[in-house]
Image (cartoon, rainbow, N blue to C red):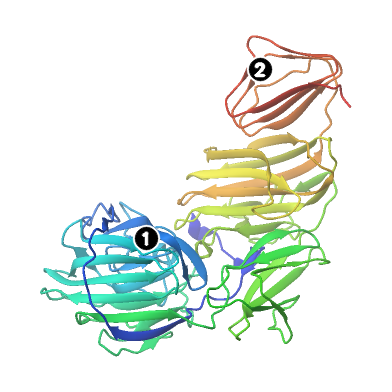
Amino acid sequence: MRKTISLSLLCIGLLLKANAQIDYVFTSFSGTYASISGATTAPLTAAYSSTRPILDESFANDIPLDFTFQYNGINYTKIHLNANGFAALGNPFQAASSVNPMYDVNELRSATGLKGAIRPVLAPFWDNLLFSNASNLTYKTEGVSPNKTFTVQWQNMIWQSGTAAISFQMKLYESTGVVEFLYQQQTGAAGANATASIGLTAQTFTATSAEVGLGNFVSLNNSGSSPTVSKTLETDNISSKPATNQGYRFTPSTCASPNGLKIKFLTDNTASIEWTALKNATNYQYALGNYEVLPSTWTAITANSVSFTDLVPNTQYYFYIRSECGSDWRIFRFKTPTTALMPFAEGFETSIDNRLPARMISQNLSDDFADIFWQTSEYIVPATGGLKAVVNASAFANAQTWLYTPGFALEQGKSYKLQFKYATSGGAQGLEVKYGQQIGQETMNNQVFNISNIANTSYKDTTLTFTPPLTSVYYIGFLYKSSVNNGLFLLDDIAMNVSVSPCNDNPTLPNYASGTNTHVKATNFITATNTINTNTNILYQAGKSIEFKPNFEVKAGAVFKAQIGGCN
């Protein structure tokens, strides 16, 4: 199913354009290898249980560092460890029973599939390694903040086959961001086909091809005392063990580019962008323009965020940011939304296949590598017409992706009706619908719908009624949520209009399903015998009385209010 749909990054609304660069300086040193005492044994999970034993192919996810570690300009608080002599800071490793994740095949320069989603990778000795026993992988955090050190140890590792051949450690230093590898030889020899890699990678930004991005990895050319490093050529055939007490150190560049760029909020004429504050930089330079051309003038700033006003609606912008020292520019592309009148309808029929309609905006909060984004497609039957919006649930990483409507001018106290149709082709799919006065994860703060276990493969009609708390322009956000799977989530026929409710006495009250947000009004009387289920927000308003009969029930987790106030 995945291969029948053409994926295009052109449809992403908010996109980090720059390829990730690895900003580290390498040095070789002689240290002292000492096994860590009082360490925690990492809990192993089999990576390919149907074919490979847990001592051969396994991992330990979400190991806490107990401090914030800045790696290549992004902050991390946990790490994932693999039996094959490397660790990852990206998405967790995935267990599989029928598909080999190929974690034992070393790839620093490029990676697709599951090995791409886990990046960035830190590889003291990446090859097909085996544990001698299940307690060979241990870790420990020592020291007092801001000078803590995290150490992970691969002890008595078998190299391809035979007996224990090598032990090694990786150390992460809180205050400096330094990464160190340290080794100890064991008596066993390397098995046949011993071909290791040693080095680091940056994050990967695409899943659809094995891009060899210049500078997005650093690779040692041998395991001796004075190796050279390359950012263009990976050495993936190291067959000699590093000497006992041999160490390799990677120190963050003193002139690194900012990373971790994201939109804080966005409207039709304002935007706020932030990035991770670098340990080695306190001053930055930025520029904003309508063309993808490196700036010749810029503005200095000491904060790690900037806001813009007086922007033009429905316009493409390019934001440039670098460290004041003269690092490479990072480029962030975004488009301002527009506003729309009601009644509003979007059936995605006028959009070119793959692209979203010009008035819709998407935002990907998932791993960039996984290509989880909203797009249209003609390959799947829509609810109506010839196209529909579809988000591709990644096989590599959990999905969290927003689709935003244009802004609507809504009035306080007036009810509005939002309609849409959704379906799934399978997998663990979920959807939240929220609205807010600004586009952005943190500003979509009014929830009207939430479902985490979508199972319908035919389109399901959904109608939501809500009343905004203030008179303002609001944007509707559809948040697609998914665990790792190969299914597709489908969305079609979005409509928005003023909700016209008759003010009759004793209106018929349905059993309100989870996710419903509505306001029921009556001139004089309401008689309630229905059920209000969990995760709803319901208001009953009548001019004279509201009567609750014995069968009336409000489930735990619902928000229910009743008030005397008539239809006005």
Residue in view at x 84 percent, y 35 percent: 414
Camera-side residue of 228 and 373: 228
In x, y percent, where is residue 84?
Answer: 27, 66
The residue singled out by tag 1 in the image is 80
Tell me where residue 112 sits by quadrant: bottom left
At label 2, the amino acid type is Asn
In x, y percent, where is residue 329?
Answer: 62, 80
Q: Secondary structure at mark 1?
A: strand
At label 1, the amino acid type is His
The residue singled out by tag 2 in the image is 530
- Note whether residue 457 is visible: no
Camera-side residue of 9 and 295: 295
Camera-side residue of 48 and 384: 48
Q: Is residue 127 above or below residue 13?
A: below
Q: Which residue ends up furthest to the right in the rendered image? A: 568
In x, y percent, where is residue 409?
Answer: 84, 47
- Note whether residue 526 is visible: yes
Mark found first going from the N terminus, 1 or 2: 1
